[in-house]
Amino acid sequence: MLRHLLSAASRPVLSRLRTSSLSASRLYPFNGTPSTPVGQPHLVRGMKVRSSVKRLCDGCSVVIRKGRVYILCTKNPKHKQVRVLAVI
């Protein structure tokens, strides 16, 4: 116990805080697998929200659902768009 305290005292305070605060149970709280750490967003490509949408390639298709106009692309996922009208 004394040996542990002496070795911990010789290390810088910042490194002691990092190792104690970032335990594996906090990073991966559900099942212990590294999906995404807590507090960090999932890196999922969303849709571009625009007032005017248009087809960008021949793989893009226009879909109208729930009063919104969507552009969905089978060739390039960056081409996904949605038209949302702003209500003031």
Image: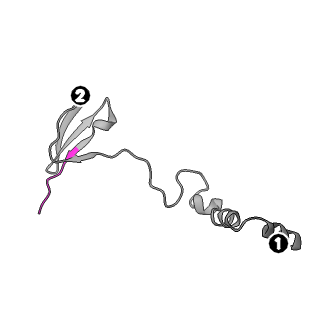
Look at label 1 and name its amino acid: Leu
Please tell me which residue is depicted at 12% across the width and 60% down the height of the picture.
Answer: 87
Dot 2 falls on a residue whose secondary structure is loop
Majority secondary structure of the magenta segment? loop
Please tell me which residue is depicted at 22% across the width and 25% down the height of the picture.
Answer: 58
State which region is magenta.
82-88
The residue beneath circle 2 is 57
Dot 1 falls on a residue whose secondary structure is helix
Asked where in the image residue 24 lies, by quadrant, the reply is bottom right
Relative vertical location of residue 48 with respect to residue 11 in this rendering, above or below: above
Asked where in the image residue 21 lies, by quadrant, the reply is bottom right
Mark 2–mark 1 Cα distance, whole angstroms, equals 64 Å
Q: Is residue 21 left or right of residue 8?
A: left
- First-in-chain label (2 vs 1): 1
Looking at the image, which residue sits at the far left? Answer: 88
Residue 82, given in percent of the width and then of the height, sits at 21, 46
Residue 32, given in percent of the width and then of the height, sits at 61, 56
The residue beneath circle 1 is 5
